[in-house]
Amino acid sequence: MEKVGNGIKKMSKERLIVNASNCHSGGGKTLINGFLKGASEKIEILVYVDNRLEINYPISKSIKIIRVNKLSRFLIGFKIKKILKKNDKILYFGNLPPYLRFKCKNVMLQLSSRFYVDSISMKGFKFQQIIKIYFEKLYYRLFVKNVSHIIVQTSTMYKKLINSGFRKKISIWAFDDLGSFSFEGNKVFKKEIGSFIYVASLLPYKNHKRLLLAWNELKKQDINPKLYLTLDGNNNNLKKWIINFVSINKLNVCFLENISRDNLISTYKKVETLIYPSFFEAYGLPLVEAKKYKLKIISSDLDYCWDFIEPDEFFNPYDVSSIARSVKRFLSIEKKLDKIYDPKEFFNKIINT
């Protein structure tokens, strides 16, 4: 409340303060872009973003963007505390909670990382990545008490968060960066028959190796479907392995290296099927995008895959042959079954050998 000239009090105007300073690439970038596009003028919005984040689209006049560099992002908590008003709402957009306890009722955290609330194998990760995830998880556990409300995207994450011991407000609010304008209504797109796409960063749990081993197994059976494969991230060892494996085995794979958002959407429009062999996800945004762009979906038979969709086919992501068989079933390729001979046929085989 604040006083006006005649002594009567009125409600202070609400304001939303958003810390999205570590969302400049990957899924975080996609979601903060979607958030900025969806914001209206109903409330004043102050958003801290990384100075590398590109905002090349119109945003609401109520949004004030404050760009920060990598070092100064650690001071944002103090900056927010300095300008904070009682009726302000705070949203931390990048998985990690604030290290300060703010004097306002609504401090929200957008949580899109399963690492902090689940026991995940670190097999295949670099030592630096393991250390980074360990300290981020420790930080999360120390300071999650400073938030009053956590926003997740799936029922699976909701359950994981409950099981981790969080007892405050939890909401399942999933959204994407496509929107009704990008989707073009019910338009039917001309698809490349028998084409597949896998959209994922180059992290070990994304399961690129087994996917390509399955593609090689299919090729040995004279089945050679086209696979579009994004190559995003700085895992150079995995990238080299992928490129070499595809080249040596002459697989029908088209690389989409550091593809722009617009070009990715154009690719969604022409590809027939999303294949998704990841071992786990907090959200699985490409599954949502594939559904909107009317792609068929073949995915791991794991919890996260069933939160938004019912896959057209599914497989065991740990089994290369299971992945290959699911592709064959989807392509309506009949499996050549082993013949069972009757005793007379078997005897004739023996004597005629």
Image (tube, rainbow, N blue to C red):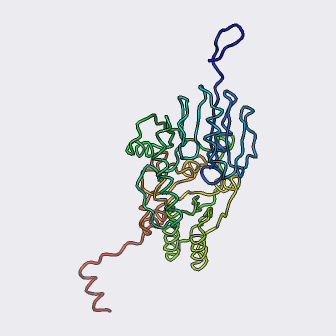
Instruction: Residue 190 in the image: state x and y as whole percent.
Output: 66, 54
**301 lies left or right of 220:** left
**311 lies left or right of 224:** left
Instruction: Residue 167 in the image: state x and y as whole percent.
Output: 40, 37
Q: Residue furthest left?
A: 343
Position above or below: 309 against 101? below
Q: The N terminus appears in which quarter of the rendering?
A: top right
Q: The C terminus appears in which quarter of the rendering?
A: bottom left
Residue at the image position 63 percent from the left and 56 percent from the top: 191
**162 lies left or right of 89:** left
- For residue 192, what is the image quadrant? bottom right
Q: Nearer the viewer, residue 204 or 290?
A: 204
Residue at the image position 52 percent from the left and 45 percent from the top: 111
Position above or below: 31 against 232? above
Position above or below: 201 against 189? below
Instruction: Residue 38 in the image: state x and y as whole percent.
Output: 66, 37
Residue at the image position 50 percent from the left and 77 percent from the top: 220
Q: Nearer the viewer, residue 168 or 32?
A: 168
**135 lies left or right of 290:** left
Q: Count up the numbered dots.
A: 0
Instruction: Residue 11 in the image: state x and y as whole percent.
Output: 63, 18
